[in-house]
Image (cartoon, grey):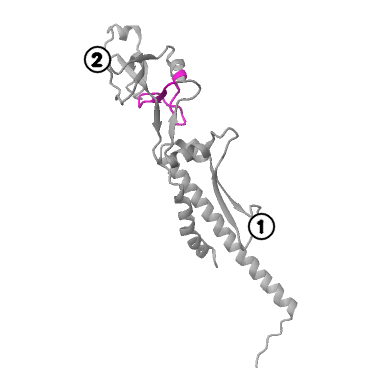
Amino acid sequence: MLRPSLKRADVERDFSGLEEEVAGFITEAMRDTTDEVKNAFRDQVRAAGLGDRLANAVRGVTYPNRSGRVSLDPTGWVYAQPSKDGRGAVAIIDSYANGRMIVAQGGRKFLAVPTDDCPRKRSGNALTPKEVEAKFGRKLQFISPNDKGFKTPSVRHKAIGYLVLKGLVIRKASGTWRNASEREREGRTRNPRPVQAVIMFSLVRSVRKPKSVDMSAPAALAEQRFDANLNARWR
C-alpha cells in the first residue's frame, strides 16, 4: 500500500502554489476580456460617427492593476473619462446612448448644425461658424428658407434658416470648397468652374441625438468572452 509522505507544511506550500497559478489564469483572462470590451466599445463609438478622439477616451483597467499581482476575484472596469464641467467624453457618449434633446445655450436662439459641405478638422469634427468665417476670411450670410431665388448645390434640410458662404468653387483634387478668385467670379478663366453659394450650417431650435451607442453591449460581451478567455489561458 502506498501512502503519501507529505507533511502538513508541504501540503500547504503545494496548494498555495496551485492557488497562485489559478489566480494568475483568472487575472490574465480578466485583463484579456477588459481589453476586448474596451476595443469593442471604441469601435462602437467610431461606428456612431463620433471620431477617434472620443473613441480613445474610452479606457479599460483591471484590478489588481500592478504588474505581477494576481487575484482569484479580479475585476475589470471599462469607462469613459469624465470632466469637471460635466461635458467630457462620458457626457457625450451618454447623450448618444439615451438620445438626448440638444437646445441652444448661452442666450442663443438657434443651433447651427453643420452640413456635409462644412469643412472638417483632422479629428473629423466640423468647424464651428466662427472657425468657418476665419478659414474663408469673411462672414457667413443668413438665408431664409423662403428665399425662392437662392440656389445652392448643398442638400437643404428642414430648418429655420441657413448660414451660407457665397462665391465658392470646389477643388477638383480634394472635393472641398475654396474662395473663388476674381477671375473665376468674372468668368475669365480658361476652364471656368461654377461659382456657388454653399450652405455651411442649418439653423434649428433643437435637435435630438440618435440612439447610436448601446451601453448594454459591453456588459453582454464581457459575459460572453470571459469563459473563452479563461479556457485559453488555462494550462
Residues at badges 2 and 1 in contact (C-beta under 8 Å)?
Answer: no
Amino acid bearing label 2? Lys
- Mark seen at residue 69: 1
Name the residue that disc number 2 marks: 148
Mark 2 or 1, closer to the camera = 2
The quadrant of the rendering that contains the C terminus is bottom right
- The image position of residue 12, as x and y in percent, is 71, 74
Q: Quadrant of residue 20?
A: bottom right
Could you tell which of marks 2 and 1 lies nearer the N-terminus? 1
- Note whether 192 is above or below 200 in the view shown: above
Residue drawn at x 48%, y 25% as measured from the top left:
105
Q: Is residue 118 magenta?
A: yes
Crowd band around label 2 with a 10 angstrom C-alpha radius: few (<14), some (14–19), many (20+): few
Residue 170 can be seen in this image: no
Residue at image x 24%, y 15%? 148
Three-letter residue code for mark 1: Arg
- Badge 1: few (under 14), some or many (20 or more) residues near its Cα, within 10 Å? few
Q: Is residue 231 above or below residue 212?
A: below
* Range drawn in magenta: 109-130
- Residue 29 in sight from this viewpoint: yes
- Would residue 157 be found to the left or right of residue 4 on screen? left
- Identity of the residue drawn at 48% across and 62% down: 228
Residue in front for this viewpoint, 230 or 86: 86
